[in-house]
Amino acid sequence: MTTISTTTQDLRRLLTGQVTSVFGGTLTATAMSVIAVVVLHARPFEVALIVGAGVVSTLLFGPVIGVLLDRVNRPRRALIAADLIAAGAVGVTAVAGLTGTMGVTVLAALNFVLGTVRIVMEGLYFPHLHGLGVSDIGTARARLQAGELFSRSAAGSVAGPLAAALATPLLFLLDALTYLFSAGALLSLRSPDRRVGVSDRKAGFRREFADGLHVLRGHPVLTGFVVYLLVGGVASSGVLAQRAIFLLDDLGLPVALFTVPTVAATLLGAGGALLAPRLVSRGVAPRRLVLVGLPAAAVTTAALPAAGGPAAWVLVATAFGIAAPAFFGALANIGLITMLGADIGDEFFGRVATLLATTSTFAGTLGAVAGGVLAESFGTRGGIWICVALDGFAALVLLWVSRRSHRTAAGT
């Protein structure tokens, strides 16, 4: 009874700290945007430099960091260190803003540090849950994702008024405090800081990296999922790059209603995250959530470029075209995490997770560029339709590869 109580309390503290840091991270994202555009009058190239700095770590060093993360035997220490490094970087940026020494280089450096910290947290978070004694990773992940969605939505609602009421650098200070709070929550955990079921013997860096690739390629669903990440990631990022212009300019959606589809997506995404573990507990295989959720997300996205007509219908169609994919995407995401925990295990989690993250980041970066090119060539509606078709094609490839690999593994 004591063990169960300790695990429950530790999980609650961990999730509270994580959700709090997500809230602060949203404030920092807003502050960076305001400072870059309003204070520094950054040119498009400089804005791209700031944004790009946040993905450099994943693109260049993600797989390498993944091998190193799988060598960490005390994940809590590494997570605390990551929180403290993030708090320091955000705090230094706040001081730069308050002292008038802020520049594009400072913002780019901050985004680089936060991008690197994000890799560490994503690679160690779930192995750390096992160390706490959490057996149902899917449910824990669902609670985390739902909490993050609500936290990000709440922070997005107050970030603008806070930026207007306070000096923008103070948002950085608030974020630094949330990272410190997260580190404090980790320090307060009573469960032993240990990694469960991982051997201390190391085979060498190249061999460990190759083993991670082998595990990824040998999984019947992940093989197709990598293809989906490459193709579907380009499509999804392309839609996102064109969405604001399409809603505001092409459809004439009032600015006052612009956030309605996003709010709907947050609510449905949280609902999907909470529903997924219940489906798994009732016997739905995690791989089925992935193989149903991703194609469904691709299909329902078609409601976005199909929107037109009266203002009320435009609002309904766009909300559905943004929120329904968020719901099905959340189902697939929880299914994927549950499947990774069951089939891959903690020993290879860092390597597999960072390889997938690197693939997704590369596709997202390419998709953002492709979205702009498509909008220029075919208009935003035409460009989004092309991205929707590409996403549907990626989903079909996922189903085909997964079914073929599954049959091969079964020897049929």
Image: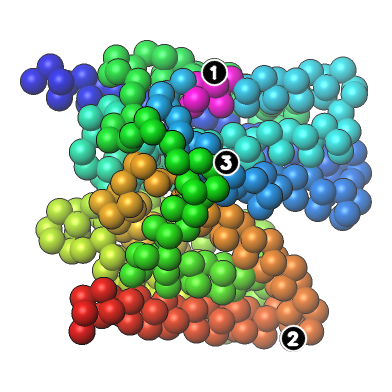
Badge nearest the viewer, 2 or 1: 1
Residue under the image location 36 percent in, 42 percent down: 347
Q: Which residue is mark 1?
A: 180
Q: Nearer the viewer, mark 2 or mark 3?
A: 3
Amino acid type of the residue tagged 2 in the rendering: Phe
Q: Is residue 354 left or right of residue 238?
A: left
158 to the left or right of 215: right
| Above-or-below relation of 122 to 131 | below
Q: Which badge, 2 or 1, is on the more N-terminal residue?
A: 1
The span from disc 2 to disc 3 (Cα, nearest Å) is 40 Å
Closer to the chain start, of discs 3 and 1, is 3
Identify the residue at image location x=41%, y=19%. 185
In the rendered structure, the answer to whether residue 209 lies left or right of residue 115 reads left
Residue type, numbered disc 3: Ile
Magenta stretch in the rendered image? 78-84
| Amino acid at pointer 1 | Leu
Disc 2 to disc 1, C-alpha distance: 47 Å
Q: From the viewer's perspective, is 87 left or right of 73?
A: right
Q: Is residue 91 magenta?
A: no
Task: Please give the residue where the numbered disc 3 appears in the rendered image.
Answer: 65
Instruction: Please state the horizontal and vertical placement of residue 295, each as a whole percent of the image.
Output: 40, 76
